[in-house]
Image: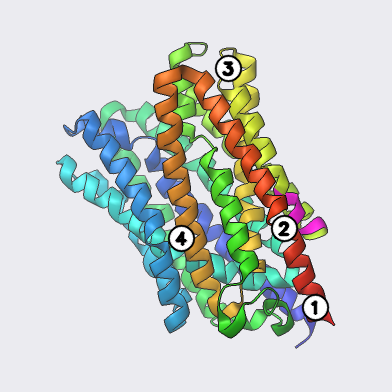
Amino acid sequence: METSVLRRRAYRLILLLGLVSLFGDITYEGVRGVTGPYLALLGASATVVGLVAGLGEFLGYAFRTVAGYIADRFRSYWLLTVVGYALVGALPLLAFTRRWELAAALIVLERLGKALRTPSRDAIVSHAASQVGRGKGFAIHEALDQVGALIGPLLFAAALTIDGVAGYRLGFALLTIPATAAVLTLLLAWRQEPTPEHLEEPGRWRTSRGQDGRLSGAFWRYTVFSALATLGFAPFALLAYHVDQTKVVQPAVIPLLYALAMGIDGVIALLAGWMYDRYGLVTLAAVPVCTALAVTAAFQVSALSIVAGVVLWGAVMGMVETTMRAAVGELSGAETRGLAFGIFNTIFGLSWLSGGILLGGLYQQYQQGGVIVAAVFLEVLALVAFFVLGVARAHRLDRQKLAK
């Protein structure tokens, strides 16, 4: 088949999956900012709110390895993606809940859906992106994703402004529209491209494949680097807590800071994707550098430094969601792509959870100074690991051998 035809099909698939993520993000990012207050409104304690949020995020990452293995074993990428996005429909049902226990169950259920869909969806995107450049493919997907991340909170804020407390139920009900649109768009993508692995040129996916279809050493070295870099990446919740404690801005400004970070994320994603396609895995060295700068700036006590830190935090997210995901596709074979994304996302999530606990404990004990010192140390360690383990070099040599 002509390359131009394959590229058109690849772009179409990436755009359709980007729209699916856009609609999905409108739904669950719209809910994410209000789950705490809504659970409290239903009678949940602060401990319960923290437990529900932590459990949901943990399950959303922990089960990705299992989901990726199942997708590879049964070649069920589309089915798991559809089931995962269908579970986003649990969130509009919050409009009918009267007990916090049921609301908590629906929130956790959606996170389980994310665990099911993410490895398979990323595997499908990586197949299509092999035709247009993996950095570019994931950048386009991430940019559309972030549009949804901006619209969702704004939609819910409008509902709360219009109808006060009752606006929660109005907001949840409105989310039925994007949740339904996500599933319908996904079904359209499945119908148009039922075998996305056929978009990938065989010579490309053999790159960095281990013996007998196993994950390569380069993939594991890259995962170690990513885990170290993620440990020092402070979650936005901790950053927001610090901003609230400093009192340098009004509480209402904090959600706007998150929106700013999401906007920066989308813009940087496009630039990071282009850089990755042009210069390869070496561009990932920018992640620990920018992370250390982001934490150092964000955990200051001046408004200007905090805004600069938020901008850098959004830039790191843009790189993480594009180049880091693109690298997984580059470092794994087509027959193990789902498992590779599953393992990577599980380790990424556990590292972020562990890092959040570590940095949160240090903040409580030593204030922002402890967070900055720990984050900078971990990012320097990650940068050293990147070059000592030779992530970019090992992959480059692997590709040169296969080219001969």
Badges 2 and 3: C-beta atoms under 8 Å apart? no
Q: Is residue 132 left or right of residue 78?
A: right
Amino acid of disc 3: Gln
The secondary structure that dominates the magenta segment is helix
Asked if the magenta segment contains residue 280, the reply would be: yes
What residue is pinned by disc 1?
401
Q: How many numbered marks appear?
A: 4
SS at mark 3? loop
The percent coordinates of residue 240 (x first, y second) are 47, 26
What residue is pinned by disc 3?
300
User: Quarter of the image containing the N terminus?
Assistant: bottom right
Q: Which mark is residue 182?
A: 4
Circle nearer the viewer, 2 or 3: 2
What is the CA distance from the residue labelled 4 to the residue labelled 2?
Answer: 40 Å
Q: Earlier in the sequence, mark 4 or mark 3?
A: 4
Badges 2 and 1: C-beta atoms under 8 Å apart? no
Q: Earlier in the sequence, mark 1 or mark 3?
A: 3
User: Quarter of the image containing the C terminus?
Assistant: bottom right
What is the CA distance from the residue labelled 4 to the residue labelled 3?
Answer: 40 Å
* Residue that appears at 36% across and 56% down: 88
224 or 294: nearer the eye? Answer: 224
Circle nearer the viewer, 4 or 2: 2
Q: Earlier in the sequence, mark 2 or mark 1?
A: 2
Q: Which mark is residue 100?
A: none
Q: How is the image coloured?
A: rainbow
Q: Which mark is residue 390?
A: 2
What is the CA distance from the residue labelled 1 to the residue labelled 3?
Answer: 48 Å
219 or 253: nearer the eye? Answer: 219
Reply above or below: 4 against 369. below
